[in-house]
Image (cartoon, coloured by chain):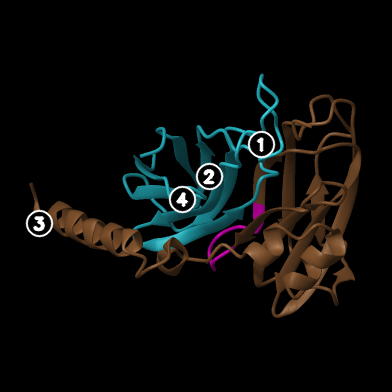
Chain colours: A brown, B cyan
Amino acid sequence: MNQNRRDAMRIGSVLSLAITAGLLKPSDVLAAPWQAGTFDAKSLADAVKAMGGDNYTISKDVSVSGPEIAENGAVVPVVVASTIPNTEIIAILVEKNPTPLSARFTIPAGTEASVSTRVKMGGTSNVHALVKADGKWFIASKEIKVTLGGCGG
Amino acid sequence: MGNPMRIRANVSGDTVEVKVLIRHDMETGQRKDASGKAVPAHFIQTLVAKWKDKVVLDAEMGTSVSKDPFLSFKFKGGAKGDKLTVAWTDNKGDSRTDEVVIA
């Protein structure tokens, strides 16, 4: 077994032991800690505020693309994008979901500020792309109609 | 360890396009099973994609991401033959890392 693999196993097992022993929370060792105050916020306003983005402006340089009507709310493809220079964060929020913040992407330099994914929508709702660029926040929205809600309720 | 991901990374000009399909139930915690009990929340919380030790995407997800999450993004600088790794961790502490060679 080569040295890199031995090192990786050693580091991996020490970290796992530390996590199991309660010395390290998994969130300590990951790139961007999962922030419970944002993902479990129950309203759009609370989620945006928890991320520090409540002074956003609407921007034509941010976009949300997706179907006009989603037949299956469990799987709605969306593309969120920003052409604003130095975009650092793009967050997807589904306004009417029980917990609106769906995903938050941190965009390092060199990565295009455009991410495509699939979200669950409980029903017809506005879908927002909230973007942070150069310390300022911007938003764009699109209404997506849903015929069959997708949160399992 | 979680289920294997399907990762495609292809060079086009100076950009690498990455598509990832992850197998994960992404339970919201609101769905009820046949006996009427709520199925506990089980979802990916963080995902990191790296090209040669440089983070090219950092994602945090909640329960509103669809089952079997799909992600597609592009980054500059990668070349054919370079390695790309994608690693995720979920709320139960489960994780998965997969690697692919950029084509």
- Crowding around mark 3 (Cα neighbors within 10 Å: few <14, some 14 to 19, many 20+) is few
Residue A78: x and y, percent? 74, 42
Q: Which chain carries label 3?
A: A
Residue B18: x and y, percent? 51, 43
Q: Which chain carries label 1?
A: B
Name the residue rendered at 83%, 24% in the picture: A71
Alpha carbon of mark 2 to alpha carbon of mark 1: how far? Answer: 21 Å
* Number of the label disc, if any, that sits on residue B66: 1
Residue A76: x and y, percent? 75, 34
* Number of the label disc, if any, that sits on residue B89: 4
Q: Mark 2 lies on which chain?
A: B
User: Would you place residue A81 above or below residue A69 in this image?
Assistant: below
Alpha carbon of mark 1 to alpha carbon of mark 4: how far? Answer: 16 Å
Closer to viewer: mark 2 or mark 1: 1
Prevailing secondary structure of the magenta residues: loop
* Number of the label disc, if any, that sits on residue A3: 3
Tell me which segment is drawn in magenta: A107-114
Is B71 left or right of A77, judged from the image as shown?
left
Residue sticking out furthest to the bottom: A135
Label 4 sits on a secondary structure element that is: strand
- Crowding around mark 2 (Cα neighbors within 10 Å: few <14, some 14 to 19, many 20+) is some
